[in-house]
Image (tube, helix red, strand yellow):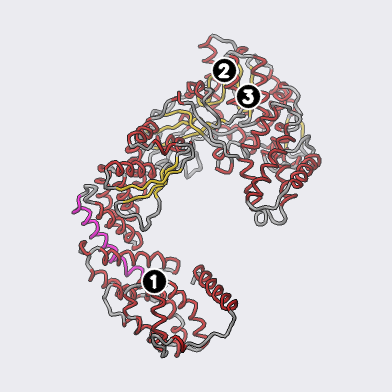
């Protein structure tokens, strides 16, 4: 046993070397890889061309081997990804209701295996085609890694089967005692920095054998300091059992010897057990596997992808220069990358120049030398850019520079897949609909199209249904523009843009169904199972289902909506539900929905909302705005839809009840405004309430601004009918208040009047002028402001700025 790394770990170096040497000496040629490593890809390509194996085994999902010809097709351009999906239709894993929204909703799982131009696996496939070798994927399909649900498994911290993403050996490496000790001793700040320094840059490995040997030693040390329990828990052992069995069975079936083959797998897996375990039974269900366009952004760590590529574009540059001159590649990649960062930074407004590029290059080289590296790594380049170009804190003064760095590191590449592959059913249905609806003009590359749809036209309504279904599935192809003055109940404005990610999103949605109609239905069903007692959510989905022309679903939701309304007691939720139902009522005839059913839901929802009003009399301040919006929604439904026959007396009685019980001046003002707006009390009553504040104790008087703010928030029209009385009441209030009290009330009172339309404010100002003796046509009697035009302009600017600031104030 040899102690290394200043006693940080104990490692039998001799045993590690012997284990690695034994694997490297096997007739079966093992090549260790790290996902998306340019250096690995370069050495692997050289090994394949030198050995020319008949079989190339690659760590990829075993049921996807048939896709290899499409991946290496001349018309396929990385980045692309193998996509695998699984739906547990019969709940054989017992995960329905655990990994899905409800016990009657099948659990669904999807996994992506990205392939970049320099991914070792992709390069191996390309070279295999070049030398005439057969490629066989050997990894356990992701649904084979799912574990059946065990009672209390989650509570005990056990894996519950929900994560289907293939685990990376790099996760194990980072957790290993060997890496931790190495990082502490060498000062590596991250796993990526460690990898780049040891293997990616500097050209320390002149030959394939040197690279393969050192990487095997490194991975052997990682494995030696990783526990068997950890490998068992993350699925490594079961995956390796499947890999080894696939290798042996394929060799036997092809009548090949081990010497005829080459294995491309994560370095950690070089040391898998060489013994046949029982075959692993895959769970029954619906599976799909295909190749889809991918992007550098989705591959990057910034998007949450965890397979170890932090800068796809930078490493592409490195890969391209490695093919020209391995020794000089890191420096040439650094120069190109630095220029790209500075170019983007200048576009964002940073003051950067060619001199900065020279400084960065020199600084990065010096940092690399100080850190004992033969060439600058990405970490050295990052540090150099910030040191030379950021004059302050990176997250403040350097935020535009950081954005430019991230954009340059990640890149914008989007892949393409050969048309020869064919399409999944949902993708096929999408393109069929594009043809049937004559939307081919929207399919230009990155072409943005605005479509105005008249829903009274049959073809345009079908387009609307198509777009709504896509939107429900979270697809970015079509986006409904916010309503404007030009949009009505019969018109919609859509922004349509095709991009490669549209197809990737469709592939992911294929788990829900084979057609857009089936997938949208399943998606809403899944959501309903989560929120079946939430009236707002259920009624919103009812409205969406009608827009998507899903009549069967509409019938089911109508029943669910009634149950949700009857069980929901929250005013905000019920008011939102009422809005959806009112809109639905206007569309009922056109959408061939039973109007009597919708009317019944409206009446029940209105009544439940009214009964919920007294409960909000004293809600916390943070809920005030939501509550007032809900109250206004109910009042607007009452006033705006006379044919609905809503019970006005019920609404008024409950608002009066809440008004009497409330201790919040703001809410009391809002309810007083509602009573005025619904003509339940004369406008002069509001003025009478203001006079009461003038006659109250100083501490009560100070809250009059809050009361006015609430009143004007809910009454914009009726309040103008009592404007004269309100102005006179405010005059009484101002005369009764001390200067200190007036100044305290002023901000909230001003905020209240800021809610009014400009014309309404002018009308109030006219009444104030008249109150103080100025009549119409007597403008010449106004006192002249003795100041310069410049000063007057500044006062106007200050007043406007005060108004803007007050909008942001949280009173």
Q: Looking at the picture, how far across and down is residue 370, in whole percent? A: 81, 42
Indicate the secondary structure of the residue bearing disc 3.
Answer: helix
Q: As rendered, which of 180 and 776 lies closer to the eye?
A: 776
* Residue pictured at 49% horizontal, 84% vertical: 742
CA–CA distance between discs 2 and 1? 71 Å
Question: What residue did someone put label 1 on?
Answer: 713
Question: What residue did someone put label 2 on?
Answer: 129
- The N terminus - image quarter: top right
Indicate the secondary structure of the residue bearing disc 2.
Answer: helix
Res 10 seen here: no
Q: Are marks 3 and 2 in contact (CB under 8 Å)?
A: no
Left or right, residue 705 beside residue 661: right
CA–CA distance between discs 1 and 3? 70 Å
Q: Looking at the picture, how far across and down is residue 327, in whole percent? A: 76, 29
Overall secondary structure of the magenta section:
helix
Question: What residue did someone put label 3 on?
Answer: 270
In the figure, 376 relative to 256: above or below?
A: below
Q: As rendered, which of 656 and 769 lies closer to the eye?
A: 769
Segment tinted magenta in the rendering: 594-616
In front: label 1 or label 3: 1
Mark 1 or mark 3, earlier in chain: 3
Res 772 seen here: yes
* Residue pictured at 37% horizontal, 49% vertical: 493
* Residue pictured at 69% horizontal, 17% vertical: 25
* Residue pictured at 39% horizontal, 28% vertical: 284
Location of residue 466 (image quadrant): top left
Q: Are marks 2 and 1 in contact (CB under 8 Å)?
A: no
Indicate the secondary structure of the residue bearing disc 1.
Answer: helix
**605 drawn magenta:** yes
């Amino acid at each position: 046993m040899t102690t290394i790394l200043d006693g940080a770990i104990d490692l039998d170096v001799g045993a590690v070397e012997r284990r690695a040497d034994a694997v490297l000496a096997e007739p079966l040629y093992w090549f260790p890889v790290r996902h998306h490593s340019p250096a690995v890809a370069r050495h692997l390509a050289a090994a394949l061309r030198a050995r020319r194996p008949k079989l190339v085994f690659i760590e990829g999902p075993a049921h996807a081997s048939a896709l290899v010809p499409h991946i290496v097709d001349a018309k396929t351009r990385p980045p692309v990804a193998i996509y695998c999906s699984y739906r547990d239709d019969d709940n054989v894993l017992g995960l329905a209701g655990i990994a899905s929204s409800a016990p009657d909703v099948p659990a669904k799982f999807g996994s992506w295996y990205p392939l970049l131009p320099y991914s070792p696996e992709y390069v191996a496939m390309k070279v295999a085609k070049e030398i005439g070798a057969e490629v066989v994927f050997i990894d356990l399909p992701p649904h084979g890694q799912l574990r059946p649900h065990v009672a209390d498994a989650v509570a005990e911290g056990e894996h519950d089967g929900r994560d289907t993403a293939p685990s990376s050996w790099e996760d194990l490496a980072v957790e290993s005692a060997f890496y931790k000790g190495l990082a502490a001793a060498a000062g590596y700040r991250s796993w990526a920095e460690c990898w780049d320094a040891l293997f990616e840059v500097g050209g320390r490995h002149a030959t394939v054998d040197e690279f393969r040997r050192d990487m095997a030693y490194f991975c052997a040390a990682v494995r030696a300091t990783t526990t068997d329990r950890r490998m068992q828990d993350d699925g490594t052992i079961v995956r390796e059992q499947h890999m080894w069995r696939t290798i042996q069975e394929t060799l036997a079936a092809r009548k090949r010897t081990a010497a005829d083959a080459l294995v491309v797998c994560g370095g950690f897996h070089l040391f898998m057990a060489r013994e046949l375990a029982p075959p692993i039974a895959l769970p029954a269900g619906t599976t799909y596997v295909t190749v889809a366009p991918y992007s550098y952004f989705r591959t990057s760590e910034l998007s949450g992808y965890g397979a170890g590529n932090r800068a796809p574009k930078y490493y592409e540059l490195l890969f391209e220069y490695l093919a020209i001159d391995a020794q000089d590649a890191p420096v040439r990649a650094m120069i190109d990358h630095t220029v790209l960062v500075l170019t983007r930074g200048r576009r964002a407004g940073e003051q950067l120049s060619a001199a900065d590029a020279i400084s960065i290059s020199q600084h990065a080289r010096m940092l690399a030398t100080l850190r004992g590296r033969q060439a600058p790594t990405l970490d050295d380049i990052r540090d150099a850019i910030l040191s030379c170009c950021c004059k302050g804190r990176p997250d403040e003064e350097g935020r535009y520079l950081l954005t430019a760095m991230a954009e340059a590191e990640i890149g914008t590449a989007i892949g393409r897949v050969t048309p020869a592959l064919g399409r999944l059913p949902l993708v096929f249905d999408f393109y069929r609909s594009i043809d049937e609806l004559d939307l081919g003009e929207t399919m230009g590359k990155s072409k943005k199209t605005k479509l105005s749809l008249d829903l009274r036209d049959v073809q345009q309504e079908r387009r609307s249904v198509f777009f709504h279904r896509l939107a429900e599935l979270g697809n970015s192809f079509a986006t409904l523009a916010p309503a404007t003055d030009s949009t009505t109940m019969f018109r919609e404005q859509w922004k349509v843009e095709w991009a490669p990610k549209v197809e990737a999103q469709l592939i992911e949605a294929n788990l829900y169904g084979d057609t857009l109609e089936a997938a949208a239905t399943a998606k809403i069903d899944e959501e309903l199972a989560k929120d079946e007692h939430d009236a707002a959510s259920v009624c919103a989905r009812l409205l969406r289902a009608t827009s998507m022309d899903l009549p069967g679903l509409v019938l089911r939701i109508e029943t669910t909506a009634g149950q949700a309304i009857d069980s929901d007691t929250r005013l905000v939720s019920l008011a939102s539900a009422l809005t959806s139902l009112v809109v639905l009522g206007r569309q009922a005839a056109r959408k061939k929905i039973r109007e009597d059913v919708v009317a019944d839901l409206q009446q029940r929802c209105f009544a439940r909302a009214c009964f919920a009003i007294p409960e909000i009399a004293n809600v916390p301040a943070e809920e005030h705005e939501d509550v007032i919006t809900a109250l206004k929604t109910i009042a607007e439904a009452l006033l705006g839809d006379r044919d609905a026959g809503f019970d006005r007396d019920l609404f008024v009685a409950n608002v009066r009840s809440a008004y009497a019980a409330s201790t919040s001046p703001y809410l009391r003002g809002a309810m007083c405004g509602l009573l005025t707006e619904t003509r339940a009390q004369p406008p002069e009553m509001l003025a009478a309430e203001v006079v009461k504040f003038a006659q109250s104790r100083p501490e009560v008087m100070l809250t009059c601004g809050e009361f006015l703010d609430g009143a004007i928030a809910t009454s914009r029209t009726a309040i103008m009918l009592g404007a004269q009385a309100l102005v006179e009441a405010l005059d009484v209030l101002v005369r009764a208040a001390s200067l200190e009290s007036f100044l305290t009330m002023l901000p909230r009172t001003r905020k209240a009047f800021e809610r009014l339309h400009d014309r309404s404010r002018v009308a109030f100002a006219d009444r104030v002028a008249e109150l103080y003796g100025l009549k119409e046509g007597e403008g010449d009697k106004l006192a002249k402001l003795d100041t310069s035009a410049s000063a007057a302009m500044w006062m106007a600017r200050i007043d406007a700025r005060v108004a803007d600031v007050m909008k942001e104030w949280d009173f």
